[in-house]
Amino acid sequence: MKKNIIILFILFTIKSLYPQSSPNDELISMANKSSNFSSQISFDSEINIESNTLDNNILNKFLFGGTINQELKNIWLSQFRKNNIVNLELNNGINFTKNLSSGDLLFSIYDKNHINLNINKDLLKLILNGNYEYQEELLSFNSSNLRVTRFQQYKIGYNLRFKKNQISLAISYLQGNHNINIVVNEGSLFTYTNGESLDLNYNINSFITDTSSYNFLNSNGNGLAIDFSSTINFNRSKINFYVDNLGYIKWNRKSINNSIDSTFNFNGITINNFNNLYDSILDYNDSYSINITDQNIKYKTYITADIGINFQQKVTLYNIKKIMFGINSKWQPLLDNKKLSFKKIRQGIIESNYKPKIYISTEIPYKNFSLLCNLNNGGYTKKTNLDLGIEINRKFTYIIGSKSINQILKTNAKQYFSLYLSIIKDI
Amino acid sequence: MSNKIFFLLLIVIIVSSCKKELELPTWDVDLIFPIANTKIDIYNIVNDSSITLEEDNNSLVSLVFEQDLISLDIDSFININEIVGETSTKLDSLKFSRIVIRDTTTLGNLLNDLPFGTTLFPNGSSTTIPYLQSIISNDTVIIDASDYFETMTLTSGDLSLTIRNDFPTDLSNISFTLVNSINQNILGTFTYPLIPSNTLQTQTVSIAGQTIDKDILAILNNVDVNESNGNVTIDYQDAIKTKLVLENIKIFEATAYFPDQEISQKLQEHVFDLKGAQIHEIGIKEGSVSIYAISTIQDTGRIVFNIPSLKKNGIEFTTENIVPPTTNGQFSQFDFNFDEYILDLTGEENRIGGDTINTIYTEFFSYIDSTGELVTLNQSDSFYYYTEFNIIPEYAKGYLGRDTIEFGLESIELNQFNNILSGDIDFESVELNVFIENFVGANGQLTFFDLNSENTEDGTIVDIGIDENIGNNIINNNYLIDAATLSNNSLPIISSLNNIKTDANLLLDILPNQINYSGEFILNNQNIIDFNQFIYLDNIVNSNINIKLPLSIIANRIILKDTIEINNTNNLEFNKLYLKILNGFPLSAVSNLVSLDENKILIDSIINDYIVPSAIIVDNLVSQKSETTLEISNLQISDVSYLVFTTELSTSNINDFVDIYSDYNLEVILSGEIIQTLGQ
């Protein structure tokens, strides 16, 4: 039943990326704007599950159970990288665009769910194998992190058209529902021969918003985001630069911050009172009790911003009318721990766990439909993927596709699962 | 549109038909971690409260075993548990107050009763009074004694009548009779031939055996008035006064208003039997005196009990208690706590013949208190009491007497060698001391009839041998114990100390499990009476045995065995255990460990003849620890209830002693590997 709910949710929930948030969205946007309309309403839905190392076999194991034997563990461990990223996005929303004489006025409402996990290979080794195999070896868990965010985005924007060029601006109010933010700043385990001693070092910081209610309308934070894009047209080409969803959410004081920071050498129970072993155990408990700092705190997190540039050229090649090249990057620092600077821009790009994606895309129109193709390399998978969508123009316009059609067609070891659907109506 | 719905439904059906339940995966993780560690030095090894460790200047450790040896009980002879002063007071000893009843007959009253009396003899006139025969005859007056009693039957008593003649002329032929109004018994008849003017006369009669009621008839049988000597002044206030006195009363039975009065008093000395001791002072540790009293008198009784020789903070003990009439013969009990009192046993202060011993002086007074009501008392009514002393002394002073206290045959258990199954252990020296500390202020004599070590497993017994201090055999030697002294006749006690010293190597060679002893202690063995002796019962004679073993030893395959009961409450099953041992002792060990089930049936042999080498020794000192790691595989402890550990210890050379120093230690690190299945 649970699975059915998930499948139905994927199929029927509505999601849309903001038109420029990923390469193919640009084409979708272009395709939509090619028709003349006074107003347009669209219904968008998308799910993306992608990883640079973890594939559907691993995911299936963790979803549907079964025994993970040593052979499987060895296979998995061989494919794990130093940092193993899993990213899940589940977004749905409604756009409304009003065509005005000098530009387009945009309204949109989205529900966005984002899970981003970066788990260190050594931590996976420890989880899968335990520490026996790693005696006299330092297992480092640095830079592992988990971010889970759900929020609603209410956006208003304007696309100002000039004679040849366009400038788009938008501002969003973000209603934060829930957030979990766990960052392993430092973490390591060293196991001495025969487990005589363990050196354990950890510095973990976690922020969790109020867990008393997971209601859709429950607000635990508020934030703002801005969008900016600029398009310069040449004769048969144009260049577009964009920054989308650059914003933050401030979570309220009901949030709990746990901080664990300790370095110690664990030698088991030190028996120093032979008359009363219980006293030794008490001393042991006192010595190794974990000191967790627990406090209610306000904090700020950033949502995932897209920054990119692309170049579009009109061509005449068979049915292909235009080709676009571009690069898209994401920016999302783990914590708001530095003032805005180039260092912080770099930090946000690295900590987004997203490799800048280079892509080439095109639209191939046919009589009753168009194919939307995008070949790209990078992103959370850090691999080359083919994004393929189909646009069907009827009474409504339907766009359905996947950003990882090549992965979907693979029989196994799929590291990227994606589906998107748009239903558009010109008014 | 219908196609779209069909398409979606088809997808749903396809997906539903392939559905799998969400479950957690399971996988094994192989964990290894430290379990426990310890650093064991000689202080940890000698985990025995009966053994203390001493170090010399070079940190050479000696084991010191110390145990109380003799416990003498010589306090019982000065405990005082006696009943004294049984006394009964009967009603015949009761007193009743003297009763006086007065009456007056004036001349005016008398002339009023005569025809023309006041006319012939007006008040204030001067006239001659003629002879008047039988001027009063058979005149009856009721005397009311109800203020004193209702009725009294007397065993003795006197009734006296005094008549005073204040008339201006003489009276003659006076006859007076007192009659009990109820039974008309004549209590007494009084005859006065002549009572001259302004004189009085008294007559007394015994009323023993008489019953007197509250209303007494006084009958004036006759009074003649003699002729006056010439003219006399007639004064109507002149009178004949009568005084009836009831005295010296002893009551057989009475219903009367009894006055407050002392019934009895007992001032007496009580001598306690202290079994030959002659004690002049006792400090009471715990003590009580109980007075048991019973009163059949239907009036409130009261007792006052004083012990002038019993003082606390200089204040004598005195008490006063009400004794109600008994109900069904029950005694009234009055308890007094004498804790921390000091009891002077020299008798009454300033007693005739001077101070004595073992004697206390008490004062007992009994009373009845008037209730203001009529109370009927009978001669058979009584007041009975006795006093019970229960005194546990804190100390006693005085001659303690000659007393022989025997002790034993008793045994002290030695379990220090219990874990040694076999082998030879040789100590370079063993010093045994028996310390006898006398806190009694009297000389004594201690003699051991037995003092030996015994291994009851093989029946071997070794006697203690020669006292190195005096060169005599300790057994049957009479050790004279000097008296302790006080500091200026008060605490603290300066004890006397005697010491018996011997080499106990032979005693311990047999790996004994008990020490046996018997003997006697004679207090005041020289029988010299000295009243300055004392005994404080918290500290009498402390005697202990002290065995000191410097740990300079030769061990040859000493096999130790220990059984550990285990309770594996968590379900951890260790795949492997690692025991790392860093041996810093100059002893090697060969160890075995077996597991037993709850019926002590062998399950598995976990460790087989595992050798832990001795530390490396240079010049009889440990220069480097030996290091070994024992790996134990396939350990199944889920059914194990007992672990039996045996180890065989040996010094590296069975001819040379090795020394054990306090900084020697054995480091043990226990770690384990478990394979844990996650996701279950």
Image (cartoon, coloured by chain):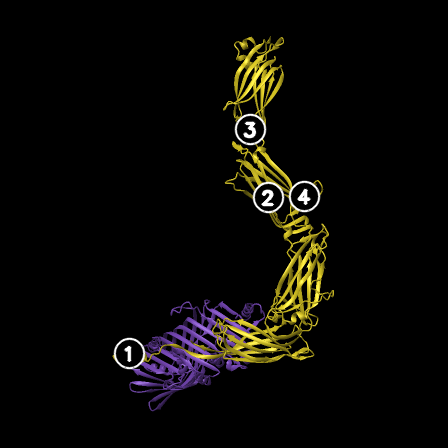
Chain colours: A purple, B yellow
Question: What is the spatial separation of the Cα atoms under label 2 and label 4, in whole angstroms?
Answer: 17 Å
- In this view, the residue in front, B612 or A213, is B612
User: Amino acid under label 2?
Assistant: Thr
Q: Give the letter of the chain under mark 1.
A: B
Q: CA distance from mark 1 to mark 2?
A: 110 Å
From mark 1 to mark 4, how far is it between C-alphas?
121 Å
Work out whether residue A101 can be spotted: no
Q: Which residue is mark 4?
A: B347
- Callout 2 secondary element: strand
- Element under label 3? strand
* Foreground tag (1 vs 4): 4
Say which mark, if any, is on residue A29: none
Q: Could you tell me residue B125's position as x and y percent?
A: 59, 9
Secondary structure of residue under mark 4: loop
Asked if marks 1 and 2 fall on the same chain, the answer is yes
Q: Badges 2 and 4: C-beta atoms under 8 Å apart?
A: no
Q: Which residue is mark 1?
A: B9
**Residue position for label 3:** B154
Indicate the amino acid at tag 3.
Leu
What subunit carries mark 2?
A: B
In the image: residue B387, left or right of residue B347: left
Q: Chain of mark 3?
A: B
- Residue B514 visible, this orientation: yes
Instruction: Between label 3 and label 2, give the one nearer the viewer.
Output: 3
Question: Is B82 drawn above or below residue B134 in the view shown?
Answer: below
Q: Is residue B410 left or right of residue A320?
A: right
Query: Viewer-nearest of labels 1 and 2?
Result: 2
